[in-house]
Image (cartoon, rainbow, N blue to C red):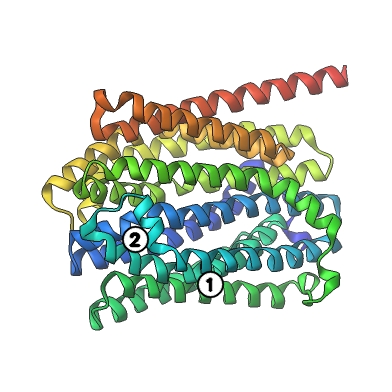
């Protein structure tokens, strides 16, 4: 694992080499979600596509909680790796594999049993209710396996290996495409077939990364016994993982509130905006994953006792992030409308989705700089402030949506999110200067 250290050499090169596999794995992971929508939309039509879109926020809730929690685990693993405490990594991996699998296994059963009640609370339109229910029940089966995958990927990122997640997602993506063709086109199971394809693919992804870790890193192998559940490690992992998990969870709950708000505009707007978000989720992955790269490299340097180099990581990363964000905005302006058309929407829905997409993409630079600052703060271990800031930004987003709907109508969803990004960036920048001033006083 020594070859994976990110505490020396060119910072820009380290960011690029470490982050590119993260970006590619994230893109492949989201693209296989596109495949569901693309095939179902073109084979089954816009109504089935709206049914998939109506369940997005519920599924996204669990995915974001898992990703949020394991992002904290990744920072903890990176700091331990920087400190040279490599024996602790096996305990971190084992303890949270058991814990997360159990928690999300129970959660999955609950959601399958109460799917109809959940969709009713969301005010899901009657003409897509059955489609959404069938899709959600099958999709939830893959959630515990996503937890296993993300926990392994997090610890491997912490030790500087971003390649594992990329390889696992390639396996998942290929399996998902083949299964979508089989279960939606060859055997016309519609949205339910697409959900089954996704769940099976996620099982394959989890199996691949576990086998990869066992074979390549013998030091990370663990046995399922009482000793693997180390209380001290679990408590430390909770302190790193819970703030981002709560923040992403609350954000997803807020998205559920906004999903209900959006459902009130009718199925055409639901199909248009959820499709635009589906495209947006892939487009902004370089921003999100570059922020994760900053967090990991900062954490390793903090663990190695190099705070000044960690600060240089932020400065270099912020410049690179701004350039990435500008390029993504230009890409959306040029091709965003064409990407939305791919999903089989009507011409009227494409117009709605395109208008929404353009408004949101205009603020990518703000979001990119916010993610760079968050990566630095989380790399320092300042997970609580990052989480609280995310919750505050969500409150701003929801409030703005309801207060400004009379001015912007359905486009208020884009403007409200963009305004929340501005608030998030302001909070992170203020925190950075507060920490920097405090450090200088201590040194002086």
Q: Position of residue 61 (x, y in %)?
A: 49, 52
- Quarter of the N terminus within the rendering: bottom right
Residue 59 in sight from this viewpoint: yes
Q: Secondary structure at mark 1?
A: helix
Q: Position of residue 250 (x, y in %)?
A: 54, 43
Residue sitting at x 26%, y 42%: 264
**As drawn, 409 above or below 1:** above
The residue beneath circle 1 is: 205
Question: With respect to residue 195, does 331 lie above or below?
Answer: above
Q: Residue at x 19, y 69 (%)?
A: 43
Please tell me in which quadrant of the rendered image residue 179 appears: bottom left
Asked if the residue at tag 1 contacts the one at tag 2, i.e. Cβ–Cβ closer than 8 Å, the answer is no
Q: Nearer the viewer, residue 236 or 369?
A: 236
Q: Is residue 128 left or right of residue 105?
A: left
Q: Nearer the viewer, residue 344 or 192?
A: 192
| Residue that appears at 31% across and 79% down | 183
Residue 225's tag is none
- Which residue has dot 2 on it? 34
């Amino acid at each position: 694992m020594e070859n994976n250290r990110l505490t020396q050499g060119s910072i820009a090169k380290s960011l690029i080499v470490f982050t590119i596999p993260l970006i590619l794995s994230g893109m492949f992971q989201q693209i296989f979600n596109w495949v569901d929508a693309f095939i179902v939309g073109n084979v089954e039509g816009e109504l089935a596509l709206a049914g998939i879109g109506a369940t997005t926020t519920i599924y996204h809730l669990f995915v974001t909680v898992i990703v949020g929690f394991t992002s904290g685990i990744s920072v903890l693993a990176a700091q331990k790796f920087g400190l040279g405490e490599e024996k602790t990594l096996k305990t971190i991996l084992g303890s949270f594999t058991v814990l997360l699998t159990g928690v999300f296994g129970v959660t999955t059963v609950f959601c399958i049993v109460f799917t109809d009640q959940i969709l009713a609370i969301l005010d899901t339109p009657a003409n897509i209710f059955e489609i959404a229910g069938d899709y959600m029940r099958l999709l939830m089966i893959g959630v515990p396996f996503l937890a296993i995958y993300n926990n392994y990927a997090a610890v491997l990122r912490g030790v500087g290996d971003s390649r594992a997640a990329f390889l696992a997602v390639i396996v998942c993506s290929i399996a998902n495409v083949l299964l979508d063709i089989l279960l939606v086109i060859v055997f016309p199971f519609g949205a339910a077939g697409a959900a089954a394809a996704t769940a099976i693919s996620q099982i394959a992804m989890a199996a691949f990364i576990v086998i990869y870790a066992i074979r390549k890193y013998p030091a990370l192998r663990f046995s399922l016994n009482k000793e693997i559940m180390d209380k001290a490690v679990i408590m430390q992992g909770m302190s790193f993982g819970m703030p981002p998990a709560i923040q992403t969870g609350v954000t997803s709950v807020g998205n559920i509130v906004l999903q209900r708000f959006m459902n009130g505009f009718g199925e055409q707007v639901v199909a248009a905006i959820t499709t635009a978000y589906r495209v947006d989720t892939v487009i902004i992955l370089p921003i999100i994953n570059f922020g994760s790269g900053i967090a990991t490299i900062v954490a390793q340097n903090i663990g190695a006792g190099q705070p000044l180099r960690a600060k240089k990581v932020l400065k270099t990363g912020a410049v690179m992030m701004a350039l990435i964000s500008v390029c993504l905005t230009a890409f959306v302006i040029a091709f965003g409308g064409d990407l939305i058309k791919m999903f089989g929407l009507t011409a009227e829905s494409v117009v709605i989705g395109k208008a929404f997409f353009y408004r949101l993409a205009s603020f990518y630079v703000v979001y990119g700089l916010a993610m760079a600052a968050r990566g630095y703060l989380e790399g320092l271990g300042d997970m609580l402030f990052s989480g609280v800031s995310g919750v505050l930004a969500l409150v701003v987003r929801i409030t703005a949506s309801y207060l400004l709907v009379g001015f912007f109508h359905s486009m208020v969803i884009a403007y409200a999110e963009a305004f929340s990004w501005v608030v998030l960036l302001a909070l992170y920048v203020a925190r950075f200067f507060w920490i920097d001033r405090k450090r200088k006083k201590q040194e002086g």
